[in-house]
Image (spheres, rainbow, N blue to C red):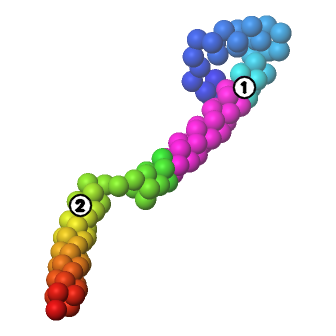
Amino acid sequence: MSHALNVSDIHLFNLLKNKLGEKEAEQFVGLVKDKINHTMEAKNQTISKDIISLHNEVAMFRDEIYKNFATKEDIAKLQIFVARIESKLLLWAFVFWATQLAAIFAFLKLFMK
C-alpha cells in the first residue's frame, strides 16, 4: 500500500478486499483518504479565512472604540480646557461686575448733584 494506513483505514481495506480485490480496495481507500484530506484542507482554509476576518473585525471594533470613547489623555486635555475656560469666565464675571458697580456709582453721582 502506498499510503500509511491507520486503524479505520485498515478496517475499511479488510472489508473491501474480499469484495473488490486487494489492489482495488487499496485504491478505493486511497481515494477516500485523499478526499478526506482535501476536505479537511478546504475546511482549514475556511477556518483560517474566518479567523483573519474575525481578527480584522476586532481591529475595526477597537479602532471604533478609540474613536468614540475618551482615553485618559483626552480626559486630561478636557480638564485643562475646562480650567482655562473657567478662569476666563471668572475674569469676565469680575470685569462685568466691576463695570456694573462703576455704572451704579456714576448714576448715583449724577443724580446726587
- Image quadrant occupied by the N terminus: top right
Residue farthest right in this picture: 19
Judged by depth in the image, the label closer to the viewer, 1 or 2, is 2
Q: What amino acid is found at the position of numbered circle 1 in the picture?
A: Val
Residue 53 located within the stretch drawn in magenta: yes
Q: Determine whether, in the image, residue 94 is placed left or right of residue 54.
A: left
- Cβ–Cβ under 8 Å for marks 1 and 2: no
The total number of labels drawn is 2
Residue at 56% from the left image edge and 48% from the top image edge: 53
Measured in 3D between alpha carbons, the distance from the residue under mark 1 to the one under mark 2, in whole angstroms, is: 69 Å
Residue 49 placement (x, y as % from top left): 58, 46
Residue at 80% from the left image edge and 15% from the top image edge: 21
Q: Determine whether, in the image, residue 8 is placed left or right of residue 65.
A: right
Q: Residue 100 carries which label?
A: none
Q: Name the residue under label 2.
A: 79
Q: Determine whether, in the image, residue 89 is placed left or right of residue 26.
A: left
- Give the magenta range: 32-57
Q: Which mark is residue 32?
A: 1
Which comes sooner in the sequence, label 1 or label 2? Answer: 1
Residue 9 placement (x, y as % from top left): 64, 16
Residue 29 seen? yes
The one nearer the camera, 22 or 71, is 71
- Mark 2 element type: helix
